[in-house]
Amino acid sequence: MKKLYFGTNLKMYKDIKETTSYLRELQNLTKDISRDEIELFVIPSYTSLNSADSCVDRSLIKLGAQNMCWEEEGQYTGEISPKMLKELNLDLVMLGHSERRHIFGETDEMLNKKVKCALDHDFIALLCIGETIENKNYGISDEILRIQLKIGLFGIPQDKLTKIWIAYEPVWAIGVNGIPATAEYAEEKHKVIKECLTELFGEAGKNIPVLYGGSVNPFNAGELIIQPSIDGLFIGRSAWNASAFNELIRNTKKIYLDHH
Ligand code: 13P
């Protein structure tokens, strides 16, 4: 079977104690699932990362940061540098989450610098892209996705491709007010993304995993994962309880296997 990706972004939830107990429980519940079949990752808050690092077996759960500056050091008050994240031995860095783009004004050009910097420091760069409801209503979703990919991944050398993951998260589908994309819609957009990645990087672009995120829940996870262009699920609220996340992973994997 192809490897299925399951990850969660803890956003600005869970303090140190909550994060470590969540991670211990999730690791314990999921440790029997073959990591050749699934890739599991958790992205806690900055302040929890150090403690998270000491309580997780990285061969079972990858750990990532929610953002990163594109410079190693300097006059960037409030930012976190790749060298600081490197000290924590992290596996990945999430870049361009919808909340970073839309609340904090991150642009595709800034994200391109961040992606390059993350790859230079040997992190997996998880680049998040997605159209707003206005983009969708104007019928320009595909163009927006292509722009976000073409600028965000501009100038990335071929030998770094294995370190790139993409999360497609339509802005209108994320969070408490989000409406989940239908599996058909998500598949259509994942196809656009995969085509664009192939255009940018040739055949090797086809191996970049593309995850869907935005109101994934136990009821829609199965139909999303069976779509041919969806390689995994990037989940917020439905993954923040370890036992619910464990069940979602197992049930979804079973649906995938039954379908193949
Ligand atoms: P929800 O699953 O809560 O909609 O959040 C998705 C998300 O933003 C993951 O990064």
Image (tube, rainbow, N blue to C red):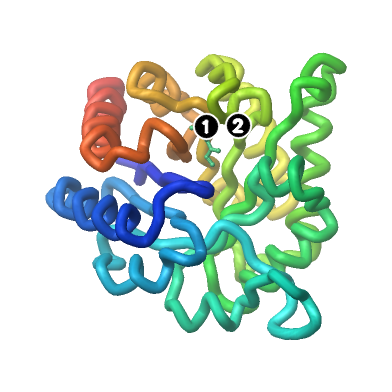
- Camera-nearest residue between 189 and 22: 22
Left or right: 5 as drawn, with respect to 33 = right
From what the image shows, is residue 17 above or below residue 218? below
From what the image shows, is residue 23 above or below residue 257? below
C-beta proximity under 8 Å, tags 1 and 2: yes
Q: Is residue 127 visible?
A: yes
Q: Residue 177 placed where, x, y %?
A: 59, 21
Which residue shows up at 43% across the image and 33% down it?
237
Q: Is residue 187 visible?
A: no
Residue annotated with mark 2 = 190
Q: Residue 46 placed where, x, y %?
A: 51, 64
Residue annotated with mark 1 = 229
Q: Amino acid at mark 1?
A: Ser
Q: CA distance from mark 1 to mark 2?
A: 6 Å
Left or right: 37 as drawn, with respect to 30 = right
Which residue shows up at 52% across the image and 62% down it?
65
Circle nearer the N terminus (1, 2): 2
- Label 1 CB less than 8 angstroms from ligand 1: no
Q: Residue 105 placed where, x, y %?
A: 81, 49
Which residue shows up at 29% across the image and 37% down it?
245
Q: Amino acid at mark 2?
A: His
Q: Residue 173 is drawn in which quadrant?
A: top right
Helix or strand or loop: what does disc 2 sit on?
helix
Which quadrant of the figure contains the N terminus?
A: top left
Which residue shows up at 64% across the image and 77% down it?
81
Q: Residue 250 placed where, x, y %?
A: 22, 34
From what the image shows, is residue 226 above or below residue 40? above
